Amino acid sequence: MGGLNFQAPGAFWWMLPLGGLIVVLYLLRMRRKQFEVPATFLWPERVDEVRANSLFQRLRFNWLMVLQLLALLLLVFGLARFQWKQTGLLGKATVIVLDSSASMGATDVEPSRFAAAVDQIEKLIGSSGANDQIALVEAGTVPRVVFSLTTDPAVMRDGLKSVRQSDTPSNMSEALQLANALVGESESARILLVSDGCFDAVDDFSQDKAELVFQPIGESEKNFAVQALGVKETADGKFVYVGVKNYGLDTAKTGVTLSGDGQTFWTKTVEIGGGKTWGQTIEFKGDAKLLTCELQNDDKLTADNVAYASGDPAGAINALLVSKGNLFIENVLTLDPRIVLDRAASLPATEKASNSEPSKYDLIIFDDVAAEAVKSPAVLTLGIPGPGVPVSDKGWGARGVYQNAVNHPLMSAVDFSTVYIEKQRLVQPTGGGKVLARTDKGPLVIASEGAQKHVFLGFSVMDSDFPLTIGFPIFMANTMDFLAPASTTGPLIVRSGQTVAFPAVEDKSLRLDRPEGDWMPVPARQGRYSVRGMDRVGQYKLSGMEQPRNIFAQLRDERESNIRPQDAVQISGKAIASERKSNRYGDLWRPMLLLALLVLAGEWWLFARKS
Amino acid sequence: MSDLILSPREFRLLEGVRLNPRKSFLGRVRGERVTKRTGISIEFADYRDYTEGDDLRHLDWNVLARLDTPIVKTYQDEEDLAVHLLVDLSPSMNFGDPTKLDSAKKLAASLGYIALAAGDAVYLRQLGQKAVPIRSRAGYPKLARSINQMVLKQNYQVTEVLRSFAKEQNRPGVVVLLSDGWDAEICSALRLVAGRGHEVHFLQVLTASELNPDMEGDLRLVDAEGGAPREITANRDTLVAYKQNVANHNAEIAATCLAIGARYHQVKQDDSLESVVKDVWKRQGWVV
């Protein structure tokens, strides 16, 4: 009986009094009229009691009673909201969340995971009932409602044709929230997640009454990815570092080719164990502006087989934001075209000072997280100092009164006098630390130069209204210039799906040529160009400016490169196991009531016949 | 009902006809009906050799003259016919308007008159009573009086009367049975009577409401003849089943009558005597 369910089983209590009443009515005996006939032996033994008016008799089998009890049973089943587990997409309201992230481009399922998922959804639409409402949410970097809840298969199919897979990570949390908002409080609704499960655990999804079903896609984890690529300038010269990871379970070979401005200068075939990373540092003598690393292999995901880096060590800033989450900082950093931003909740072990490998990042930003000693050449600490930060820490203190700031490029156009700061870190500079701004409680901004550049801000930005002031983006831009000055004319390297902004001097549109051969206009809005739509890996060209810019989009996302299909996904701390067959409890109260009416009609017909 | 039961018009209707049994029966007294016995009549039967003592009036003189051999002509004898009238006096005959009993009495009187007019001996059979033959047209008032005196009897069963009649050493003849036939044992009783050499003429007298009852609702049926009561719901299914039972019962009677060489017909209690005489008796050869 695992396939049965009742949403309101309390309704079965009605069965006792009503069923008992029907049976009692049939216990009443008929008072019959006497009628004399010449002979009774020709009359059949036929007693069909349809009414009673006297007490009492032995209960006898009666079809009318059976039909009435059956009608009552069906009625009670209907009131109890009888449900039956069914296979297929027959939900009253179903929101399909289609993962369109980079990992869905894997070709372990012919022709690709994404195409197979679309095909699967099309079949589900085909098998849906006339009253089944279906909505589709495309879970890309920015989730999109492809079509809202509808029962029209034409709308569904048209919408399905418009979905496309991108080489970007998915924002599954927002996609699920969006799906949840679409189904609302509907009781028999479901959210059907069609994905390979290659996304980070979703912690901030509050599920309503809708059932969440995970339908997995994918079969293989065979994949290589360029994990690290960059140029370091040391006293011994310029070096290229490259790292490749084998995400498969078995040892496999891959070709690695490095080229500068399109000219191959190094190539090698390497064998990498399952789950292992290979890395090498190569001397780089050229002055190429763009460094490209390409992998040659037969893995299942091609989007991460190419990576770009600026040939000029100052050409781009690879930054790591270590934070519990700060949208203000993320927005400022991602809009800066120089910055290739990674996010982490805690410092990766590979970036700690104790690790011998070279750092992947030009800059590490600790936001309201205790700073640690790192290998990167520049560190920005917001709030809590730690080892390596050139300050002595005395803990949190009360809010102070702004006193002054020194004349320094970092403080250009930044005014802390109007900023409300809830609490201030009580620190004193050590080593080469220089106080750039202070309150009566002590230094507010400290900067130091040397082998490792440091900037320390003596409060947490979330404990102030600093992010709401114009000084915040200026301060962050000044900090980037101070810590990791980058070229503004060379090729721009971004993450696929990333939005970058440029200042607009004229009110005219730019043209963005995409790697697929098409192009899109980039209009000027509020004095700047926001370049979106770079969701495929490859070269983009932004023209219309004084100097055209080449933009190279790369995946560089470990979670997307790890294409091992997941049997379960973690949603709000709960493991949602995969369900190959899309099952649901179909609400059957309407058919039950209809059936009860039919039985009652049959009972009436029988009653009329017997009367 | 008048003393004579029949009206003058009905008497005229019955004039000139006589019962037409399929079989010949031995008579007791000389009558107008040819019997199996050879005797004196104008009906030629056969030739045989002359033996001493034969009536010389029956010698065929033509044959004697031509062949010189004495040959005697024989003739069928003519005797009376025993007609046993049995009227069902069970309570079930008290249905209809007129009642089935009144109708049966009239039919019995009619057939009795026909038999008396033809010189047959009429026996009015009643349970527990010795029947005295009534002969000649002059005996009709006596017959009518006896019929008039017949009344319904409780615990009367027509099959019991038939069996009792069959057991008695009654003179074989035509047994005219006037009954509604509402007895499950009627067929076996008819066979018993036929087995004693009688020819049964069975007129089943029924009412329209018995053939096509008009009733509805939940009823407790009480048997007029004291049978077990039966509770029914008089709906379409029940009435269809009842009609089927009646049809089966009557079909069984008809088949039995056919098997034993009896005449059988069903009449309604309100059918006129004229229609019975013309449409049944004359048309089907009950009378000639």
Image: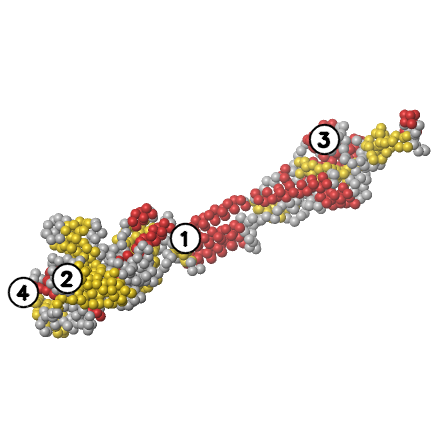
Considering only order in the chain, which callout, 1 or 4, is on the residue closer to the N terminus? 4
Tell me the SS state at disc 2: loop
What residue type is disc 3 on?
Lys
Instruction: Find disc 3 in the rendering and name its residue.
Output: B282
Please, is residue A292 above or below residue B170 in the view? Answer: below
Residue drawn where x is 30% and y is 52% of the image: A136
Measure the C-alpha gap from mark 2 to mark 3.
135 Å
Considering only order in the chain, which callout, 2 or 4, is on the residue closer to the N terminus? 2
Which label sits in the foreground, 2 or 3?
Answer: 2
Which label sits in the foreground, 1 or 3?
Answer: 1
Image spot of residue A229 (x, y percent): 19, 64
Tell me the SS state at disc 4: loop
Which label sits in the foreground, 3 or 4?
Answer: 4
Q: Residues within 10 Å of mark 3 (few under 14, many from 20)?
A: some
Residue A285 appears left or right of A202: left
- Would you say the residues marked 4 and 1 are in contact, meaning their CB atoms lie under 8 Å apart? no
Q: Chain of mark 3?
A: B
Measure the C-alpha gap from mark 1 to mark 3.
75 Å
Instruction: Find disc 1 in the rendering and name its residue.
Output: A588
Measure the C-alpha gap from mark 2 to mark 1.
66 Å
Q: Are marks 2 and 1 on the same chain?
A: yes
Q: Chain of mark 4?
A: A
The image quadrant of residue B68 is top right
The image quadrant of residue A402 is bottom left
Tell me the SS state at disc 3: helix
